[in-house]
Image (spheres, rainbow, N blue to C red):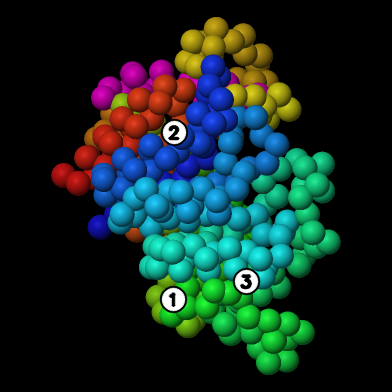
Amino acid sequence: MLRLSVLDQSPVRSGGTAADAIHETLELAQACDRWGYQRYWLAEHHSTPGLAGSSPEVLIGQVAARTTRIRVGAGGVMLQHYSPLKVAENFRVLEALFPGRIDLGIGRAPGADSLTARALRADTRLEDFPRQVGDVIAFLRNRVPPDHALAKVVAMPSGPTAPEVWLLGSSDQSAALAAHLGTPFSFAHFINDEGGAEVTCAYARQFRPSEMLGTLRASVAVFVVCADTEAEALRLAKSRDLFIVRLYTGRSGRYPSVEEAEAYPYTERELAIVHHARRRTVAGAPEQVRDRLRALAAEYGVDELVVVTITHDVKARLRSYELLAQVFST
């Protein structure tokens, strides 16, 4: 059975505020908990006017406290900026509060421009990423090797369970590391639709069972707009067209309305950006979306899809997730 999960980037709508976005995240999480979604991940972005989710570990606690069943986690923590011990301790606190419900998704990307990354970053290099991931896992599971320089350090609070660690990525590097370490892997199709199936297949071939995970587990994150009709879904998706164009041309701003997008005078270069971005979007009526998502999951060889849905209209966003849950339950 194909499982559905959520990645929420806490979008800031034009005409709205970042505080509105955070409260809309809480509302959506509660609804998705009722509708039967498997997990709810919070994204990490910095200095991005259109995305308010800069601190997933803080939002996770709020979401988990307002829900009862759904797993809640980071999708993901941009580890290159942080101390592995501090990340492990943040998530050990969350696990103590909500045992058996916390995911720690770890990303390799900066989640920010170079200037913001410099403002965030500890004295680490990108090539340190595999070591950082290994340290986080060791601290989380109280398995720091005796010959490690930090062997006597214990991540607190200790406990009988640990958060589930996922590696996230849009290329083969994080997939290879996930296979080597024996962790689940999630591919970001909504960022990169080229070669993803080959990446997840390579992960499956190279996967080495670990103490954390005996059998491989993979998912694919995909951008979806589902509405009562195909025409309405395609209309709602126009907001993403303009948001992506502005993001890719260095003019990032709040998530535009459909009316703004329809009135915008796209250049030929910008239309090419739109065309490319639409390849990573699944938009349509419920049955259309279900069929396309099932085909995508089969192509990638996964049994879980992480759904990213952003619309300017808050009610339309909620309706998209509701329709998707309904059509997959029939």
Q: Is residue 281 visible?
A: no
Give coordinates of residue 275: x percent, y percent: 55, 26
Name the residue beneath numbered marker 1: 161
Question: Label 1: few (<14), some or many (≥20) within 10 Å?
Answer: few
Kindly give the residue lying farthest to the bottom in the view shown. 146
Asked if the stretch drawn in magenta spans residue 240, the answer is yes
Name the residue beneath numbered marker 3: 136
Is residue 161 rendered to the left or right of residue 76?
Answer: left
Give coordinates of residue 317: x percent, y percent: 38, 30
In the rendered structure, find residue 251 and report the number of the disc placed on it. none
Q: Which of 288 and 212 is in front in this view?
A: 212
Query: Where 165 falls versus 75 (above or below)?
Result: below
Is residue 234 rendered to the left or right of residue 145?
Answer: left
Amino acid found under the numbered disc labelled 3: Val
Mark 3–mark 2 distance (CA, rounded to whole Å):
31 Å
Residue drawn at x 71%, y 24% is 251
Asked if the stretch drawn in magenta spans residue 30, the answer is no
Q: What element carries label 3?
A: helix
Q: Which of 250 and 270 is in front in this view?
A: 250
Q: Which of marks 3 and 1 is nearer the N terminus?
A: 3
Q: Quadrant of the N terminus?
A: bottom left
Amino acid found under the numbered disc labelled 1: Thr
Residue drawn at x 48%, y 53% is 61
Question: Label 2: few (<14), some or many (≥20) within 10 Å?
Answer: some
